[in-house]
Image (cartoon, rainbow, N blue to C red):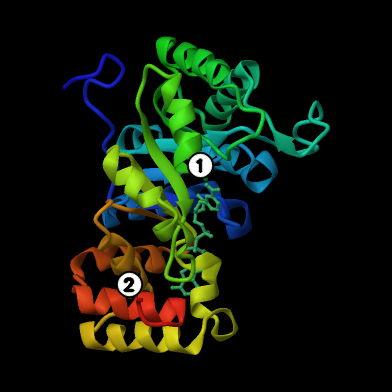
Amino acid sequence: MTHPYHPLGFTGSRLAQGYWRLAEWGMTDQELVRFIEQSIEAGITTVDHADIYGDYQCESLFGKALALKPSLRDQLQIITKCGITLPSQHRPEINCHRYDHSTQHIIDSVDASLKSLNVDSLDMLLLHRPSPLMDADHVFEAFEHLYTVGKVQHFGASNFTPQQFDLLQSRLDMPLMVNQVELSPLQLKHFEDGTLEHAQQHAITPMAWSPFAGGDLFRLEGINPTLHKALTDLAEAHGASLDQIAIAWLLRHPSGIVPVLGSGRIERVQSACAAQNIHLNDDEWFKVWIASTGHPVP
Ligand SMILES: NC(=O)c1ccc[n+]([C@@H]2O[C@H](COP(=O)([O-])OP(=O)(O)OC[C@H]3O[C@@H](n4cnc5c(N)ncnc54)[C@H](OP(=O)(O)O)[C@@H]3O)[C@@H](O)[C@H]2O)c1
């Protein structure tokens, strides 16, 4: 069934590239253009931002690259987030690190993101975190306005429980299409708390932030030895690398998890993308699960 808000639905790439750490990468605008081009060549067209990333600077850095090569815009699906306020020299009007889901804040935040990113519209806007003060009717007012004036095509949430997601959805005319949550072989919480079942039931795309647990998966002090061994054994069996097994493990889940990569090194992005060719069977998937939980399944 077509929906008046989404006649064509939202189609992104199987993996997404996150730009939270962009300000740390120290790239020139030209180097960033090349990084985006090479990511696209590797199969990643969905990019993930937030207004607050890099003290409100990452969107602007990305926007400078798009200004240098405007043809990139049409090859990308741009996601950004709003709803967290951070005191910053770049936002002198903000006094408090808190959540703000008011109609005006959401609209103002999108206007600022469009300007920074140097684009006319966003493919997807996510509410970054749930707020105890969220009034879903106020969010709807903002979303409806942003859709009607053509500034945002699709909407979703991040770090929402199924109940928070349902509350917001209950007041919206447009379907929320994404819930972005932390998922990795080191972070199993949302595999067990109903988030992924809820996503499957309602055809919501789960996006996995920190799919390598922020790099802990590669640090011996960050990972239990049994899990490290399970991942390295599978890597050897598949002629693959540990990062690829971690991504293949997420991709194997029936909810259609989209891992959001965080590396600024193109060879690591390419390696993660190649994990799409690795199929883990159920025995292999559960080896990682059991090694991570530290006990057999009941
Ligand atoms: N919605 C939310 O609340 C939320 C929260 C956090 C993040 N996010 C999104 O998720 C994205 C990814 O998060 P993340 O950056 O934490 O992801 P991640 O991929 O789990 O961690 C990235 C870190 O791991 C390192 N790394 C990646 N591949 C590696 C490899 N093969 N070997 C050794 N180290 C490796 C990277 O270092 P190098 O750069 O040196 O490769 C980087 O420091 C963010 O950019 C953001 O878009 C969303």
The residue identified by callout 2 is 244
User: Which of pointers 2 and 1 indicates the residue nearer the eye?
Assistant: 1
* In contact (CB < 8 Å): disc 2 and disc 1: no
Q: Is residue 298 above or below residue 25?
A: below
Determine if residue 45 is in view. Answer: no
- The CA distance from mark 2 to mark 1 is 27 Å
Determine if residue 283 is in view. Answer: yes
For disc 1, the neighbor class at 10 Å (few under 14, some 14 to 19, many from 20) is: many
In the image shown, does 74 or 33 lie closer to the viewer? 74
For disc 2, the neighbor class at 10 Å (few under 14, some 14 to 19, many from 20) is: many
Q: Earlier in the sequence, mark 2 or mark 1?
A: 1
Q: Is residue 36 left or right of residue 32?
A: left
User: Could you tell me residue 281's position as x and y percent?
Assistant: 18, 74
Mark 1 element type: loop
Q: Quadrant of residue 232?
A: bottom left
Q: Is residue 298 above or below residue 182?
A: below
